[in-house]
Image: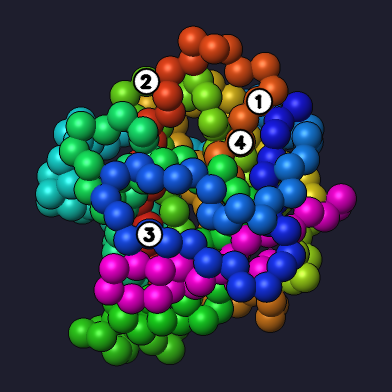
Amino acid sequence: MFSINYVQPVGGLEYDQRYKGPGASELTQSVDIRHIDVTDIRNQTNDFNLDDQGFEAVRVAFDFDDYQNDDAIREHLYPQVIEYLRDRLKASEVLIFDHTYRSTSRQDQTIHNRAPVKTVHNDYTEKSALHRMLEETEQRPELRDRPYRLVNLWMPVGHRVEESPLAVLDINTVAADDFHRIKLVYPDRIGEIAGISYNPDHRWYYLSDMEPGEALLLKVFDSRYPEGIFGTPHTAADPVNTPDNARNRNSLEVRVIAFS
């Protein structure tokens, strides 16, 4: 049983990200806390894939260990992720546009370092996804007519995940009415993500005891999805029996646009 923080479907949802360092773990104070069974896919990883359920478990073997250094991540890890995902996603082009280190104890406190988000959300709406795609293809306009997906590669860093694992929803169990727009305030721009309200049809999953070398792929937007369905909702979730001595979760998300 997990504690899951849904969004209350109220107007005027807003989240302020004008800071450096981990900050708050909630996207809104308007939460609807539910205790929910979350299915462990440890012994059935082959039953889930990015195109059908919106997420999948993978193994990665990147030649990289300098996760405290954002410049090193961009210079040395990004090219490996691009090569891996171009093959894995069967994509004609993969563009990395961002990464986030999730931790409350990282040495280097930057805008790339944030706390695990304990509110059910999806990273994009159709408006913000289009804005991101157009921004990232300013020098590559020939890509703009192709179908595209926004995909997150989520990896534990340093040690096994002992608290706040990533829980994900089967996209087939999510309705358009479950998505609620949240204004995202950055130092230099305004973005938009989606908070998710409770639906008894939701089916939740996670991969227990994830180790470095294991990863999850999440499809957070697909230009071919039906109107109103943006991408795979997810959240950092707390098992109700988490040990008091569990180590804080450290993880890295690399965000890409993959073109068909």
User: In which quadrant of the rendered image does the C terminus lie?
Assistant: bottom left
Q: Neighbour class for label 2 at 10 Å: few (<14), some, many (≥20)?
A: some
Sequence order check: which comes first, mark 2 or mark 4? 2
Amino acid type at image mark 2: His
The amino acid type of the residue labelled 3 equals Gln
N-term-proximal mark, 1 vs 3: 3
Residue 46 image offset from top left, x and y in percent: 63, 37
* Helix, strand or loop for disc 4: loop
Q: Quarter of the image holding residue 142?
A: bottom left
Give percent across and percent down for residue 74.
18, 52
Quadrant location, the N terminus = top right
Dots 1, 4 in contact, CB < 8 A:
yes
Q: Magenta region: which residues?
A: 179-201
Relative side of 192 to 258, left or right: right
Depth-wise, is mark 2 or mark 4 nearer the camera?
4
Q: Is residue 185 visible?
A: yes
Residue under the point 52% across and 24% down: 163
- Labelled disc at residue 237: 4
Q: CA distance from mark 2 to mark 1?
A: 18 Å
Foreground disc of the pair 3, 2: 3
Residue 73, labelled with which disc?
none
Classify mark 4: residues with Cα within 10 Å, few (<14), some (14-19) or many (20+).
many
Q: Nearer the viewer, residue 62 or 181?
A: 181
The residue beneath circle 2 is 159
Q: Position of residue 56 (x, y in %)?
A: 57, 45
Identity of the residue drawn at 60% across and 77% down: 224
Mark 3 / mark 2, whichever is N-terminal: 3
Q: Which SS does the magenta portion mostly show?
A: strand
The residue pinned by badge 3 equals 17
Q: Is residue 44 above or below residue 33?
A: above
Disc marking residue 239: 1
Local SS, label 3: loop
